[in-house]
Amino acid sequence: MSAGFISNAILPFFSFCSASSAAYILNDLLDRENDRHHPDKRNRPIASGRIPLRSASLLAALLAFCACVMAWSVSLLFLAYLVSYLLLSIGYSTRFKSVVLLDIFCISAGFLLRLQAGGVAFDVPISEWLFLSVFLLSVFLSTGKRLSEKQRLGDSAKHHRKALVAYSKTFLEGTIYMTGGAVLVTYTMYVISRHSSVLLYSVPLSCFGLLRYILRIQSGKDGDPTESLTRDLPLLIVGLAWVVLVGWGIYG
């Protein structure tokens, strides 16, 4: 295994994994009281009390420190993106998640910082269509998750997330439809710009995945993207097929 592969792939991957883990731990620490009003999140280690607050805080600090050390070994620009991600995560957990719309855009900004950092790590320019696709997809998924929480929690939603009270069901549904259609267009343009006949076949899969996710939300199921992908068999199959097609189209 070459030193170039370690610096270009492994270190960036683990540095952002560590940074994301630190951010999630911090969010769970600050959100532990609200999570106890959620039917699923109340079983999380911090909210349920299985992990002491001091231990969780020390782990988050250690992960953030290791992430910065690994990022510094990659490049200063990569470190700048990672530190920006950590600062954004802190701002989201302490303040922005309670502000309407700003909470969704903060989540989207986090995905965009990851995208840009990946481009720096692999020295690959990020195209305009890919940038827009990632942005719109993150808004789509974040909105879907909030609509799912609002439907499942009902009147107790205000105890879990303050911003949920200000979001009407009609607004969230309209935003899902708008961003879902927009992300399909921008992704299609990205595929066309790659001039790959193989990648073109991933567009119908993407369309199916978006519609399946919307149907899942409308059926009252969990809107968490990870839960949706791992627990919904059609979504999982389509997701795996999409990965194969994209990998083949880009690297095959």
Image (spheres, rainbow, N blue to C red):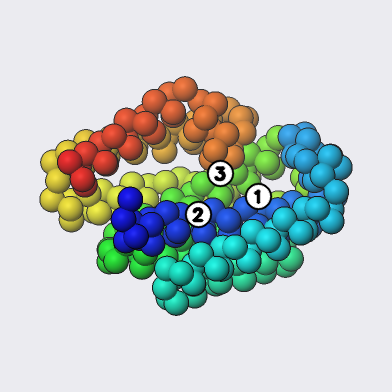
Pinpoint residue 51: horizontal percent, then vertical percent: 82, 44
**The residue tagged with tag 3: helix, strand or loop?**
helix
Q: Which residue is painted at 37% across and 50% down in the image?
A: 183
* Amino acid type, mark 2: Phe
- Which dot marks residue 144? 3
**The residue tagged with tag 1: helix, strand or loop?**
loop
Q: How many marks?
A: 3
Crowd class of label 2 (few under 14; some 14 to 19; many from 20; radius 10 Å): some
Q: Is residue 74 left or right of residue 42?
A: left
Crowd class of label 3 (few under 14; some 14 to 19; many from 20; radius 10 Å): many
Q: CA distance from mark 3 to mark 2?
A: 28 Å
**The residue tagged with tag 2: helix, strand or loop?**
helix
Q: Is residue 148 above or below residue 110?
A: above
Image quarter of residue 118:
bottom left
- Single out the mark in the foreground, 1 or 2: 2
Q: Which residue is painted at 66% across and 53% down in the image?
A: 24
Q: Is residue 83 above or below residue 169?
A: below
| Res 102 visible | no
Pinpoint residue 39: horizontal percent, then vertical percent: 77, 34
Crowd class of label 1 (few under 14; some 14 to 19; many from 20; radius 10 Å): few
Q: Is residue 169 left or right of residue 176?
A: right
Residue labelled with disc 1: 168
Q: Is residue 250 above or below residue 43?
A: below
Pinpoint residue 146: horizontal percent, then vertical percent: 63, 46
Q: Is residue 75 left or right of residue 122?
A: right
Camera-side residue: 99 or 175? 99
Residue labelled with disc 2: 14
Q: Which residue is painted at 54% across and 38% down in the image?
A: 226
Q: Which residue is painted at 54% across and 53% down in the image?
A: 17
Q: Is residue 53 above or below residue 113?
A: above
